[in-house]
Image: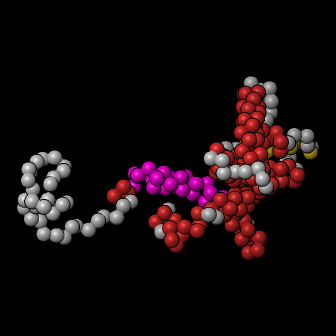
């Protein structure tokens, strides 16, 4: 919204928006995985991640290695995929127009990406669809390809886990300011992402769809009222006397 209202001053934030969002998302997702055993969305719906082949005293838990793999497929891979899609659309147009030449290694890499990315996208989408269908008929415990590659699966959080979550969400003010500040920052960022995402999406839709008051009128500057002396029987275009006045939009 700020970039659209004042692009000269705030337009630079659009170029680094994805990177700033990825850093904030990385912090929040790691905090949720470490404290609650699941991503922010999974914790919101009462789910938690457990390692596929790890049990301790009859209760499965999320190992540190699985947290890093989960961060990779929750934050890093989607960010790389968005960047690749942007470059793919740009380079595909260049390849169709004949701009890309296979003379140097950069253009060769771009041509390979243009030809290979649709197949990678098709295979990953088809694999995710097959896993989702198998999960819906209880033939697999992995509803998505990212969970399968991460080596974790989702389970409904037990009453004991939810009680631990509530204990962790409570701030112990007696533990010292150095221990309270990181918790406040993580919880504040989590709440801002949860509730701010809906507000940002609504604001973007509001500004892009023309639903804002006077958005269509304010999009273009209003021209000044013409200041000239109008003379009857004189054509305003050619400045000659009108020979045959008509009702058509042309005269002279």
Can residue 165 be seen in the rendering of this structure? no
Image location (x, y in percent) of residue 84: 71, 50
Q: Residue at x 14, y 59 (%)?
A: 235
Image location (x, y in percent) of residue 29: 73, 55
Image location (x, y in percent) of residue 83: 69, 53
Image-quadrant location for residue 170: bottom right
Q: Main secondary structure of the magenta part?
A: helix
Image location (x, y in percent) of residue 136: 72, 28
Residue 15 magenta:
no
In depth, the one of 2 and 90 nearer the eye is: 90
Q: Is residue 138 above or below residue 119?
A: above
In depth, the one of 79 and 196 nearer the eye is: 79
What range of the chain is rendered magenta?
Answer: 187-212
Side of 200 relative to 247 (left or right):
right
Q: Residue at x 15, y 63 (%)?
A: 239
Side of 18 relative to 123 (left or right):
left
In depth, the one of 115 and 186 nearer the eye is: 115
Q: Residue at x 76, y 27 (%)?
A: 134
Image-quadrant location for residue 240: bottom left
Side of 160 relative to 92 (left or right):
right
In depth, the one of 111 and 193 nearer the eye is: 111
Q: Residue at x 58, y 68 (%)?
A: 12
Residue 194 magenta:
yes
Q: How is the image coloured?
A: secondary structure
Image-quadrant location for residue 114: top right
Can residue 224 be seen in the rendering of this structure? yes
Image quadrant where one finds the C terminus: bottom left
Side of 195 relative to 167 (left or right):
left
């Amino acid at each position: 919204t700020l970039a659209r209202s004042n692009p000269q001053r705030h337009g630079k934030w659009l170029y680094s928006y994805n990177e700033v969002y990825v850093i904030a998302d990385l912090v929040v997702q790691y905090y949720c995985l470490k404290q609650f055993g699941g991503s922010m969305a999974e914790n919101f719906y009462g789910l938690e991640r457990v390692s596929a082949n790890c049990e301790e005293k009859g209760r499965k838990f999320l190992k540190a290695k699985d947290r890093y793999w989960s961060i990779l497929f929750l934050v890093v891979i989607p960010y790389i995929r968005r960047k690749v899609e942007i470059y793919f659309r740009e380079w595909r147009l260049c390849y169709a127009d004949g701009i890309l030449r296979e003379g140097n290694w950069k253009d060769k890499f771009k041509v390979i990406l243009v030809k290979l990315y649709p197949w990678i996208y098709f295979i990953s989408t088809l694999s995710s669809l097959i896993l989702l269908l198998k999960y819906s008929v209880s033939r697999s415990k992995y509803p998505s390809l990212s969970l399968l590659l991460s080596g974790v699966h989702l389970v409904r959080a037990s009453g004991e886990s939810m009680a631990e979550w509530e204990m962790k969400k409570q701030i112990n003010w007696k533990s010292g300011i150095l221990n309270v500040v990181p918790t406040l920052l993580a919880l504040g960022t989590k709440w801002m992402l949860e509730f701010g995402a809906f507000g940002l999406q609504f604001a973007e839709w509001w500004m892009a769809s023309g639903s804002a008051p006077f958005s269509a009128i304010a999009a273009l500057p209003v021209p000044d009222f013409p200041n000239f002396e109008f003379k009857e029987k004189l054509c305003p275009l050619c400045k000659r006397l009108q020979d045959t006045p008509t009702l058509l939009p042309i005269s002279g």
